[in-house]
Image: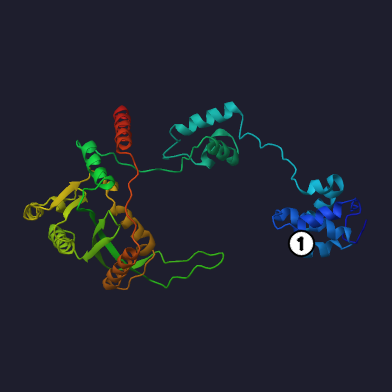
Amino acid sequence: MLYDAGMRSDVEVRLGPGDRERLEAILADRNSAQKHVWRAEIVLLSADGVGTNEVMRRTGKSKPCVWRWQRRFMEAGVDGLLRDKTRKPGRAPGPGPVAARLIERTLGAPLGETTHWTSRAMAKVAGLAISTVQKIWRAHGLAPHRLRTFKLSRDPQFASKIRDVVGLYVDPPAHAVVLSVDEKSQIQALDRTQPSLPMKKGRAGTMTHDYIRNGTTTLFAAMNVLDGTVIGQCMQRHRHQEFIRFLNRLERDIPAGKLVHVVLDNYGSHKHPKVRAWLSRHPRWTFHFTPTSASWLNAVEGFFARLSNRRLRRGVFHSLVDLQAAINRYLAEHNQSPKPFVWTADPDAIIAAASRGYQVLDSIH
């Protein structure tokens, strides 16, 4: 039993028979939880006459923490150090009728000329605390501040096109190349008006909100679905002439004797009469169009998203040449370790979901 100037006068730390051996075993066991280790260390140091301030220094714990575990040991012994006290269950976010009324009001139209509820506005109307409103919303999965965008395809051949394109991804024809082709147009070469500051501890990286635009470029890209490589070419404009130039490059790069199946969207330049004439002169090529308003079906869109997020959005480009060089370097880096595109969604589930969407929209109108 030991006291010191920093130890509470109502706490007396005494080790019973076998307590020291058990505590030292906890310290020696590499598999002991860290919280058990420092609790045992507090008790051993206190029993050895070490002052509270020194215990705090050695264990890195606060004075109330040291006192708490000294008292816990004297009340429950070593076993008390190895378990946490149970806490009372949290209170329900609100009585049932109150929550029901709030949910009903949340699902209705907001007051005045606003488009959606906020927790502050709802708390004012319902006469509840903001935290109570937030708890009820969280418990019932309601998030009025969030909005998801969508667009249902009205293509009359939606189902057949979905199955056609997904069939190419899942079971590509033998001795054929399957390409996902699209263009990322109007990529801006943006330079910032002031130098950006790097990220450091406690502060995010910075970038000026205004910029200097040094021109735009269009990236034509073709992803090989089988191995994930991407062939890309930057061009000044986005017309059928540039699209035919890109097709000619692909024709040169793809080995002779291979059939070529191309997945692409319904952009006007893809269906231009001169493009159709080019197709008739190259019989090994077959175009497979995605349904209208369904560009998400095109595999190369994922590559465009990664390019935007990882290279373009935070990039600083002093000229159009800088931008095009950065895109080309990103393409080369991507092709060093490509990954095959793997389609996992069930086309029947997609078609069924679209059908449900049509029914909901029709019922609203």
Q: How many marks?
A: 1
Q: Is residue 165 visible?
A: yes
Depth check, front residue: 332 or 153: 332
Q: Of helix, strand and loop, which one carries label 1? A: helix
Quadrant location of the N terminus?
Answer: bottom right
Q: Which picture quadrant has residue 65?
A: bottom right
Give left or right: position of 169 versus 112: left
| Residue under the point 11% across and 52% down | 272
- Which amino acid, by three-letter code, is at mark 1? Thr
Give left or right: position of 335 versus 158: right
Depth check, front residue: 60 or 185: 60
Q: Please provide percent x and percent y for residue 336.
A: 33, 66
Q: Is residue 278 above or below residue 153?
A: below
| Residue occupied by mark 1 | 59
Q: 10 Å neighbourhood of mark 1: few (<14), some, or many (≥20)?
A: some
Q: Please provide percent x and percent y for residue 10.
A: 91, 51
Q: Please provide percent x and percent y for residue 230.
A: 27, 60
Q: Is residue 154 visible?
A: no
Q: Please provide percent x and percent y for residue 49.
A: 90, 62
| Residue under the point 30% across and 53% down | 301
Depth check, front residue: 264 or 252: 252
Give left or right: position of 309 versus 67: left
Quadrant location of the C terminus?
Answer: top left
Depth check, front residue: 20 or 74: 20
Q: Is residue 291 above or below residue 341?
A: above
